[in-house]
Image (spheres, helix red, strand yellow):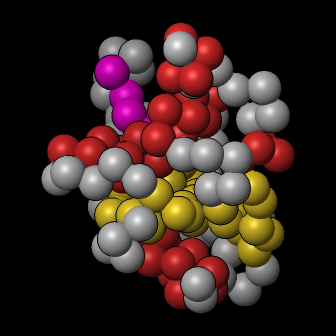
């Protein structure tokens, strides 16, 4: 998998972010096992609680289109006009990932110029998932 291209896809998704309050725009590019890429951006709300992260937007879009297995996601973010060197998924997004991804799921963080590649099990080593309910 070309991680640089995946990060660039996340940068494209970031352009659609709706962030009138924080002005912190996040984009995600999620790869399904089918090979299809699902884009997501953060969508803020004045009440804050209904705000949705880019990662969850991408997952929910993919699931709503029938995809249930995933191989990788790239996440980028930063204040309008800039990219932060590292934007990691929040705890809620990590929990959504635990629902659909195994420990080998790849998470790419950074910028197109400098990124790092992580296994999901490294970002959430003691996840709670459907396996716990069996």
Magenta-tinted stretch:
50-54
Could you tell me residue 59's position as x and y percent? 37, 47
Q: For the N terminus, give its image quadrant.
A: bottom right
- For image coordinates 61% across by 68% down, the residue present is 82
In the drawing, does residue 125 fall left or right of residue 52?
Answer: right
**In-front residue for pair 104/115:** 104
- 64 above or below 112? above
Whether 27 is among the magenta residues is no
Q: Is residue 13 visible?
A: no
- For image coordinates 37% across by 28% down, the residue present is 51
Q: Is residue 114 visible?
A: yes
In the drawing, does residue 77 fall left or right of residue 51?
Answer: right
- 41 above or below 115? above
- For image coordinates 62% across by 56% down, the residue present is 105
**In-front residue for pair 84/30:** 30
Q: How many marks?
A: 0
Query: In the orientation shown, which residue stands out farthest toward the front?
Result: 134
**In-front residue for pair 65/44:** 65
- For image coordinates 41% across by 41% down, the residue present is 56
Could you tell me residue 31's position as x and y percent? 44, 67
Snapshot quadrant of residue 64? top left
Could you tell me residue 74's position as x and y percent? 57, 65
In the drawing, does residue 128 fall left or right of residue 70?
Answer: right
Could you tell me residue 101's position as x and y percent? 54, 45
Specify the principal SS of the magenta part.
loop
In the drawing, does residue 124 fall left or right of residue 32?
Answer: right
């Amino acid at each position: 998998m070309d991680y640089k291209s995946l990060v660039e896809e996340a940068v494209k998704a970031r352009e659609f972010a709706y962030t009138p309050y924080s002005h912190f725009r996040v984009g995600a590019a999620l790869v399904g096992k089918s090979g299809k890429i699902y884009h997501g951006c953060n969508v803020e709300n004045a009440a804050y609680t209904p705000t949705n992260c880019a990662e969850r937007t991408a997952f929910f879009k993919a699931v709503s289109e029938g995809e249930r297995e995933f191989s990788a996601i790239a996440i980028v973010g930063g204040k309008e006009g800039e990219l932060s060197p590292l934007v990691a998924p929040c705890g809620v997004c990590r929990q959504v990932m635990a629902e659909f991804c195994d420990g080998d799921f790849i998470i790419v963080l950074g910028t197109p110029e400098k990124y790092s590649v992580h296994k999901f099990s490294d970002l959430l080593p003691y996840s709670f998932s459907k396996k716990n309910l069996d």
